[in-house]
Image (cartoon, rainbow, N blue to C red):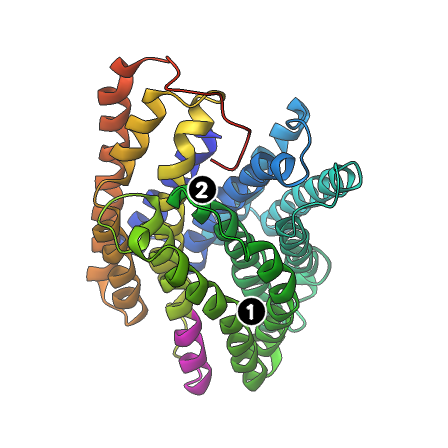
Amino acid sequence: MPALVLDALAAFAAALALWLSASVPTAAAAHLVLAAGILPLILGAMTHFVPVLTRGPAHAPAIRAIPWCAAAGGLIGAAAMASPALYPFGIQAGAALALAGGLGLLGWIVRRARAAIGAPHPCLYWYVAAIAFLVLAHTPQIVFFPAGAHRGALRSFHLHANTLGFVGLSAIGTLQVLMPTAAGRPDPGAAARLRRDLPWAVAGVLLAAAGAAWNSPFAAAGALALLVPAGRLARAWFALFRREILARDGAAPALALALAGYVALLAAGIDHTLHPGSGARLPVAFVAGFLLPLVTGAVSQLFPVWLRPGAQTQWHTCMRRALGRHAALRCACFIVAGALADRGYAAGLALAAATLALFACQLALALRRCAGDGPRASGRRSRPGPG
């Protein structure tokens, strides 16, 4: 998992640099960060959370290859988009690798769910739905893309099924498990909320993806449906974790701002459906205004666990404090960067790149400063959990 985190941060940096330089098509840079960085990271994170959600043992070593299979596919696909003449079938090959990774992980999740001790946590079904959208997004790329019929519509469906479906459902499901851990207090309504809101989320993604491809009013209806679970989650968090999410430091404000960025992007998507042709920069805003707050916030909570699994020690506490410092300001900068990028201002990309560079420095300094705290345990050995 630490290697997948570094892969994702490198993909963010490379995509922002490519967008700033305008040296490759926008879609190629977006594919680089989404398919070669975020897709592997999410698949890897699922391998961390699924054993917790099913109350079972850790994943088998062979499962670790799945995210890297997807990463390879993402790199191939991005290269094909940047230089179609050099990689004539690169998009299909990349989609096939991503599809293979998704199906492999889905099979493993289903097996773990059947072997679960008691009923699996409802978040598991959000992961299943997310991977189902990953499959839906990549199958047309393999089957229909070479023919050219409805190519633009299928591209739009692919984009929305990936971003709102795979990434969005994975993120919203995981946030409801991760925020209580980051805040240090339980969320008693999380399981019921996940069960109640999954149909809204699935219907919203289907409407948004199909509408973006073939009928704009359906896309707006899908975004409105997706606002229902996001709004319920925001209301629950503000009631339960108000003090933590209004803090300056820590993972909690970062995760709350990631949710705020997600809501802002849904609202922007509705606006773009009312003004056809105005949403070309929305993928850039999705990366800067939602994914960067989400990933840096989650990493500040989970990276210490991924780097040193097992008993929670003084080192883990030191790392979390160092990575969570000024999290609210950092993620606010990302959201502002996303808003500027959506309006076509290069300053938004520059702000996102600078803020990401500062987080990378923060990570390097944290590793150095906390090295002296050693691996000694700070107390009892905790039950395995999401972080």
Residue 386: x %, y % from top left: 51, 37
Give the labeled residue for mark 2: 181
Indicate left or right for 172 with 337 as reference. Answer: right
Query: Which residue shows up at 21% across the image and 52% down it?
Result: 329
Establish if 31 lies above or below 300.
below
Is residue 180 found left or right of 197 in the rendered image? left
Horizontal and vertical percent for residue 244?
31, 50
Picture coordinates of residue 308, whole percent (x, y): 44, 21
Question: On screen, 202 above or below 385?
Answer: below
Q: Is residue 275 magenta?
A: yes
Question: What residue appears at the point 54 percent right and 83 percent down from the top-left corner?
Answer: 216
Judge by depth and name the residue closer to the eye, 270 or 51: 51
Q: Quadrant of residue 243?
A: bottom left
User: Which mark is on residue 59?
Assistant: none
What is the magenta range?
A: 266-276
Tag on residue 156? 1
Q: Quadrant of residue 144?
A: bottom right
Crowding at dot 2, Cα within 10 Å, few <14 / some 14-19 / many 20+, comes out as some
Residue drawn at point x = 28 percent, y = 40 percent: 324
Helix, strand or loop: magenta stretch? helix
The mark nearer the N terminus, 1 or 2, is 1
Q: In the displayed structure, does residue 235 sit left or right of residue 94? A: left
Q: Amino acid at mark 1?
A: Ser
Residue 286 seen in the current view? no
Q: CA distance from mark 1 to mark 2?
A: 36 Å
Question: Which class describes the residues within 10 Å of circle 1: few (<14), some (14-19), or many (20+)?
Answer: some
Say what secondary structure mark 1 lies in: helix
Q: Decide whether residue 239 is among the magenta residues.
A: no
Label 2: element kind: helix
